[in-house]
Amino acid sequence: MPTVLVTGANRGLGLEFVRTFADDGWRVHACARNIEKAKAIKSLSGDVNCHRLDVTDGLKVASLARSLAEEPLDLLINNAGAYGPRTGFGETDYEEWASVLQVNTLAPLRLVERFVGVLEQGEGKTVVNISSRMGSIASNSSGGSYIYRSSKAALNMITKGLSVDLGPRGFTVVSFHPGWVQTDMGGESADIPVQESVAGMRKVIAGLTTADNGRFFNFDGEELPW
């Protein structure tokens, strides 16, 4: 059976990825920082394996990779994310900026570097980075949100770099904008249900080929500018 690893799996997009992949017969490794509070994951049916993982802790990431070293992995979804302070120009919290970069930018690369061996054993060889349209430099017409925007723009650059480095090894690495989703991060005004966003991304993921390596997609399959 195909196998997927999802970070930030205890709620929102991550939980929906876990639920739907498990329903479709995948073996799922669901990673969350606080497993004790991840009751929703534990209540799911299917082949779901919970792992305590703080994606900013390099030793813990390496330990998990070693524990799964003998199990081929087809798909890695770097979903864990943080928004940080919703401030504008002149109000930047530089310590929080560093924290957000750890989660949104450094962690996805760390996961790929540590799990590349088990991904290479799988048939899918696919890495999905959950980014944001707010990380698109070409689409920025409103300014502000320097912390979040920069972390996702940097993640997009990582996606592009990985596509160049891993493409010759048969990998497909892409970024996704999940839409303005009705999650804790998206807020009450968001217009896209979690189920719609994940269903759209899964449809695109299912159709990915190596020709899509290094692309940036909207959840509905539209290609977005970097």
Image (cartoon, rainbow, N blue to C red):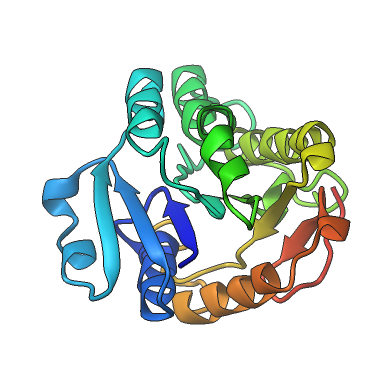
Q: Where in the figure is residue 129, as x and y percent of width and height?
A: 61, 48
Which part of the image, by quadrant, shows the N terminus?
Answer: bottom left
Q: Tell me where residue 92 sits by quadrant.
A: top right
What residue sits 82% from the left and 56% below the top?
210
> Residue lying furthest left in this view?
36
Q: Where in the figure is residue 108, as x and y percent of width and height?
A: 55, 36
Seen in the image, is 8 located left or right of residue 116?
left
Q: Where in the figure is residue 35, as x and y percent of width and height?
A: 18, 47
State the residue in front, 66 or 172.
Answer: 66
What residue sits 42% from the left and 46% below the top?
71
In the rendered view, would you say 136 is above or below 212?
above
Seen in the image, is 26 located left or right of residue 140?
left
State the residue in front, 22 or 99.
Answer: 22
Seen in the image, is 193 located left or right of residue 49?
right
Q: Can residue 84 be seen by looking at this rendering? A: yes
Q: Tell me where residue 124 sits by quadrant.
A: bottom right
In the rendered view, would you say 5 is above or below 11?
above
Q: Where in the figure is residue 207, as x and y percent of width and height?
A: 73, 73
Q: Can residue 191 be seen by looking at this rendering? A: no
What residue sits 88% from the left and 48% below the top?
138
In the rendered view, would you say 19 is above or below 64?
below
What residue sits 71% from the left and 76% below the top?
220
Seen in the image, is 164 located left or right of residue 64?
right
Q: Tell me where residue 89 sits by quadrant.
A: top right
Tally the marks.
Answer: 0
State the residue in front, 20 or 79.
Answer: 20
